[in-house]
Image (cartoon, rainbow, N blue to C red):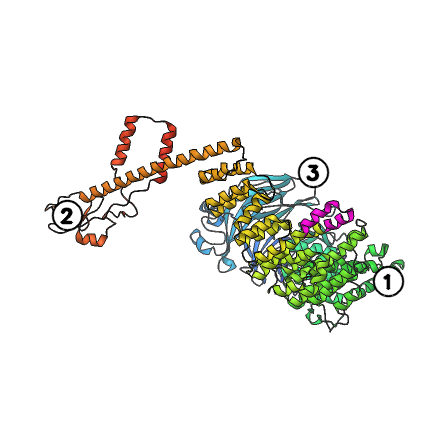
Amino acid sequence: MSKLKSRIAVEPFAYFDLPTHHLSISSLSLSHSTLYIGSRSGSLLLLSLYPNPSPSPIEFLSLPSLSRNVSLLRTVSISDSPVESIFVLSEIGAVLVLSDGFLFLTDSLLIQPVKKLGGLKGISVIARRFRGPNSQSTNLTDNASNFLKGQRILDKFGGVRANGVKKGDLEQSREGNYVFALVIGQKLMLIELVLGSDFANASFVVLREIQCSDGVKSMVWLDDSVLVSTIDGYSLFSCVTGKSEVIFSLPDLSRPPLLKLLWKNWEVLLLVDNVGVIVDALGQPVGGSLVFRKGGPDSVGDLSSYVVVVRDGKMELYHKKSGNCIQTVTFGVEGVGQCIVVDEENRSGEFVAVATLTKVVCYRRVPSEEQIKDLLRKKNFNEAITLVEELECEGELSKEVISLFHAQVGFLFLFDLHFEEAVDHFLQSETMQPSEVFPFIMRDPNRWSLLVPRNRYWGLHPPPVPLEDVVDDGLLAIQRAIFLRKAGVETVVDERFLSNPPTRAELLESAIKNIIRYLEVSRQKDLMLPVKEGVDTLLMYLYRALNNVDDMEKLASSENCCIVIDRCQEEELETLLDGSGHLRTLAFLYASKGMSSKALAIWRIFARNYSSGLWKDPAAENGTHDGSACVTSGRETAATEAANILEDSSDQDLVLQHLAWIADINPALAVRVLTSERRTNQLSPDEVIAAIDPKKVEILQRYLQWLIEEQGSDDTRFHTLYAVSLAKSAIEAFNSESSSQGTDAGRQEHLKNIDIQRDLIFESPVRDRLQIFLQSSDLYDPEEVLDLIENSELWLEKAILYRKLGQESLVLQILALKLEDGEAAEQYCDEIGRPDAYMQLLDMYLDPRNGKEPMFKAAVRLLHNRGESLDPLQVLETLSPDMPLQLASDTILRMFRARLHHHRQGKIVHYLSRAVDIDARLARLEERSRLVQINDESLCDSCHARLGTKLFAMYPDDTVVCYKCFRRLGESTSVTGRDFKQDAIFKPGWLVTRQENTNKAKGRRRTNKRTVNKRAAKSLLRPPPPPPPPLPSEQY
């Protein structure tokens, strides 16, 4: 009955055979659950359809068995000629029929008598107007000019319609709006069918007449365009302007043209031989073309996303976008003659009817989900995926269904041993839960058995089992298929497996790798805590199965939810990792779960047994390092990981327990542990200092430095301990440098290693650190440090300590005589601030004692730099008779000139200051001696009251106020708001006037003298005192 090409898109549900052989089918019309059949003898048959629900799975029944789903309700005779077209006007329950060139009207149940519409004859083709949902087409029935044009035909009947309706009653009888285009000869007429209360009052109005060519075969009216096909080609007429244009011409000897309206996208299919060209309402091609079977179809229908064509008893479905033939169904024998296919006029896209001359078969579209299920049952996975992608682009599938499909096809791929494709679809599914793959990894029952949702989806795959069972069952299926293939039986097993059967190990490895890929992506999702625990724990199991050490350690060292100890499991993760030798992974897991003591115990074992094979350095395996480097790298790694744990730990006992072995490997790591800021509660300094190995001096010093400088500790014990420790190290370093010049190469290498370890902790030399600390801190005991370095050569450190103790003479001796740092000695004298300090320093230079030669150059430099601050007499008394005159002469002369200059400059300043004082006194006297005259018209500048005989006050800015306002404003603030304490008034006095006159009279003076005088005046002149407050005065 039916031949399946690829997939099942439609299935038959009704079959009808004409009751008499004298009838033959000429036309069909399908509307909802009714089917109208027009015969060649002019009869119209009404059939009722009873579509049953689509079975699942899809089953094809024999055509005779489907005859019970259809029944013949009524038959009516239209004319003696074939019924050419049938239009069901379901909105008003009417049927319009074209037969013998006339239009006939009857009710949808074929009960009332058939009404023949007069006035129109010789109609060859008729088409109903359709408008798209977003169309901006013209409403022809509201166009007055078109309406008047349509009256010409009525004039032939003397102003009365052929059916007896007068012109005046026209508007009252237009209850329906059904517009048609029809061809009569070479005229294209646009009419409106107007129905009254019954068919007896039916009428029509000619809206427009357009001239067209003869021989029209088919016609479609969409929006404002009427597309017409003739034997010469396809044309487009505008129903608004009446203009026509050729879409394209047909070649000679081509098949008859055919037009079909495609409801879904409101497009039109034009048939050219066996090619279907799809155009829009303007005749412009859209999308691609459809290539049909050789010879071309007899009729074309529209079904959702498919174009249905029939010929020679076969129906083919072509996808509109891809152009692929989806399904081929045989409903009649070859050579059965002209075939017809019709679709629903209500555009639901669910049913089509095909007919030969004597029988009709109705098909319905199989639901999308059923099509997908049918392909999956037959293991046509790729075709099912293609179908889903097509339906998704067309918007026919919801996100939930698409998600469910990906999960379902993923499980089918998994049981079909295509693990990579399975996980690809799992990742595309939003319905799929990570816990659904748990049964494939661990057998039930387990800790997460209750978390696995019992989703069967479409029930197309078996229940989940461990991957080992999946692989074993798949291999058995492959072996069975190979045996059946040899026996000549077709199977659905993948050809790649049949030609090259995989091994069990390869399949298991592929399965585990792809399940790992799915779980790794699932870790990034927001999951419930139990599901997270399952994902991470089972991911660790899978890493262990493949011995992916790097991935295991990466997971264990990151934030994870692995269950390390689970007494409910037969094989807990802790035992498995310990037994397989993955101790590093176990240590990382312990650390991530807060089991620091267990993790540190493992790292300590690694540090001690680094050469026993417990851990292998990848660099050593690649041959890039020698044995000693591998040992060092292993120990460093263990110590580093242990240090990372201890940096976060506030358990003091645990930290101090593992501090020693970490310090033995790398002192810098020990310092990191002790000075970590990441722990919540810091360690007790006393306990830490007591636990540090006395030989690890650098660790102790760095810890004390951290306590003092970064933690701000002001405990004198720690400051003194730090200073003493630095002093000891400085003495040792000094002695080592002194003795290293004469030692052998081995000793020098040992000292170099010590320096390297010290450089790992400190960036600066020990003496620099000691000197900085001795200068910056005031909380250590300088005497204790001084006792330690008293007999050493650390002279600068001694100077710092003597300075702390106030021993100025000793400090100067060290700086000037021992270190011979004159600049530092002079700076220290500056700090002292007394002139006798410079004299003491000069005496040390001239009489160094202890058999040392006088330091004349240093003494001259001191006199040159600081001679102005020294008493020349004392300097002369101090100078040694042995000092060369040429060294001291210039300096002594400079000292004398400076003394004389200071003396004269002091006199200038004295007289200038005295002049300023006199000027200020005179100004004050002038202000207090001023008189003011008040008359009867004088007003207070504040309250504007007449002063009369009242007391008043006058401010320096010449404002006058009454005594009451003076008490209110105060002494320093006038009516203008000026505060004389903050903004004093300076008036020129006799000194300024005298200086100006003197400058004018004398002219220019020498530049150097004027500059000196101005600088002296500027440096010593003080601003005059503020003017005295106003005093109350009586009226004069």
Helix or strand or loop: what does disc 1 sit on?
helix
* Range shown magenta: 732-753
Q: Which residue is mark 2?
A: 939
Give the structural element (helix, strand or loop) at label 3: loop
Q: CA distance from mark 1 to mark 3?
A: 59 Å
Residue 439, position as x, y percentages in the image: 74, 67
Query: Taking the image as drawn, is residue 331 in sight?
Result: no
734 magenta-colored: yes
**Residue visible at 82% across and 58% down in the picture:** 506
Quadrant of residue 853 within the rendered picture: top right
Check disc 3 and report the residue beneath it. 252
Q: Nearer the viewer, mark 2 or mark 1?
A: 2
Mark 1, residue position: 480
User: CB atoms at circles 3 and 2 under 8 Å apart?
Assistant: no
Instruction: Compare residues 410 and 574 and report the one nearer the observer.
Output: 574
- What whole-number distance in Å separates the C-alpha atoms at marks 3 and 2? 123 Å
**Within the image, what quadrant is residue 254 found in?**
top right
Question: Is there CB contact under 8 Å for labels 1 and 3?
Answer: no
